[in-house]
Image (cartoon, rainbow, N blue to C red):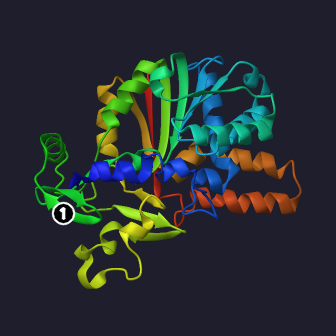
């Protein structure tokens, strides 16, 4: 019997785990992300980067970092839009991807080579500990929902015996976090504090932006779920805990390491972790609000004036999904921090 966090770590991050297998993301995969939905997601973030440089907070020689880049779609879109909006920056910016999985790094290098050849230089590090930058603009999309977690309920935490879930005694660290955030039922993320400290140590001056699903405060329920072939399965619906509501013909064993395992982010926990590491929260809002604020509408206007009507309509339909309240616009939130 092991704590759920160890079970989740094996599911996602073991050598034969889900993320190590380089899963497809998008229409052919288990789920889609904003980065696979429209190039204007990376484009809007690129426009934000340019604004931060023009405001003087960061210089034109800063390091641009993506964490959790999958194949590299978002950072590639950022580079492409920088070329469109302010091409001289490509000569001064340094682009970095943090990627611990060697197989995924190989795929990223292949994709970015095909996209840019030698025109844009990218660097890779296995962890933030290797990065030492004077100034950095750091972005992550759907990163923190993949941090391992404990699952708690009524003073107990979840353990796994094979594929059988069992609630039992709670360790002191988990109990402390439950008390701090008044959580009696839900997920307790592990690793936020260590991540924030590593990021703080990696850059003297920094802006960090991340998008994820979740709420500012704990939701008061268990959100743990599995994504497989664009279908969502509440974790316990595949166990005997579901009783009469259990999903038939599916099991944890059949989805183990072959599908995504995730949960809603508690942004108040994330905020505390970053503030303890020397960052200040600058904004928290829906993805829709953030992308419009970053300049998404301006980018669409530029596109409209530079391509034919058919091409414009096609890209517009994709971009609208990023801010549509019924799709990605309000399902995801953005939080932005700065370290001065």
Residue drawn at point x = 79 percent, y = 40 percent = 114
Residue 146 % position (x, y): 42, 49
Q: Residue furthest bottom?
A: 244
Question: Element under label 1?
Answer: strand
* Tally of numbered discs: 1
Quadrant in the picture for the C terminus: top left
Residue 150 % position (x, y): 25, 51
Residue drawn at point x = 81 percent, y = 28 percent = 119
Q: Which residue is mark 1?
A: 166
The 10 Å Cα crowd at callout 1, few under 14, some 14 to 19, many 20 or more, is some
Residue drawn at point x = 64 percent, y = 43 percent = 74
**208 or 113: nearer the viewer:** 113
Residue 102 % position (x, y): 57, 37
The image quarter in which residue 236 lies:
bottom left
**185 or 146: nearer the viewer:** 146
Q: Is residue 292 above or below residue 209?
A: below
Q: Is residue 210 above or below residue 135?
A: below
Residue 203 % position (x, y): 48, 19
Residue drawn at point x = 57 percent, y = 43 percent = 293
């Amino acid at each position: 019997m092991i704590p759920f966090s160890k079970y989740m770590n094996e599911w996602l991050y073991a050598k034969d785990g889900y993320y190590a297998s380089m899963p497809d993301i998008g229409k052919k995969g288990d789920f889609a992300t904003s980065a696979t939905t429209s190039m204007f997601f990376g484009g809007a973030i690129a426009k934000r980067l340019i604004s931060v440089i023009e405001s003087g907070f960061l210089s034109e020689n800063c390091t641009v970092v993506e964490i959790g880049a999958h194949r590299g779609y978002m950072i590639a879109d950022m580079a492409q839009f920088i070329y469109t909006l302010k091409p001289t920056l490509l000569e001064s910016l340094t682009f970095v991807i943090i990627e611990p999985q060697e197989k995924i790094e190989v795929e990223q290098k292949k994709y970015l080579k095909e996209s840019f050849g030698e025109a844009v230089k990218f660097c890779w590090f296995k962890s933030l500990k290797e990065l030492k930058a004077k100034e950095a603009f750091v972005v992550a999309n759907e990163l923190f929902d993949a941090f391992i977690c404990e699952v708690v309920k009524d003073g107990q935490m979840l353990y796994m015996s094979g594929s059988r879930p069992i609630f039992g005694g709670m360790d002191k660290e988990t109990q402390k976090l439950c008390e701090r955030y008044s959580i009696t039922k839900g997920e307790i993320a592990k690793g936020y504090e260590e991540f924030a400290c590593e990021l703080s140590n990696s850059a003297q001056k920094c802006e960090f932006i991340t998008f994820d699903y979740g709420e500012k405060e704990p939701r008061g329920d268990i959100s743990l779920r599995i994504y497989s072939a664009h279908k969502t399965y509440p974790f316990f619906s595949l166990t005997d805990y579901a009783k009469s509501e259990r999903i038939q013909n599916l099991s944890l064993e059949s989805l183990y390491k072959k599908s995504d395992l995730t949960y809603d982010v508690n942004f108040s926990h994330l905020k505390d972790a970053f503030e303890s590491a020397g960052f200040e929260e600058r904004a928290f809002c829906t993805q829709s609000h953030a992308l419009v604020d970053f300049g998404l509408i301006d980018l669409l206007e530029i596109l409209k004036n530079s391509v034919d009507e058919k091409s414009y309509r096609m890209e517009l339909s994709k971009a609208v999904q990023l801010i549509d309240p019924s799709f990605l616009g309000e399902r995801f939130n953005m939080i932005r921090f700065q370290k001065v």
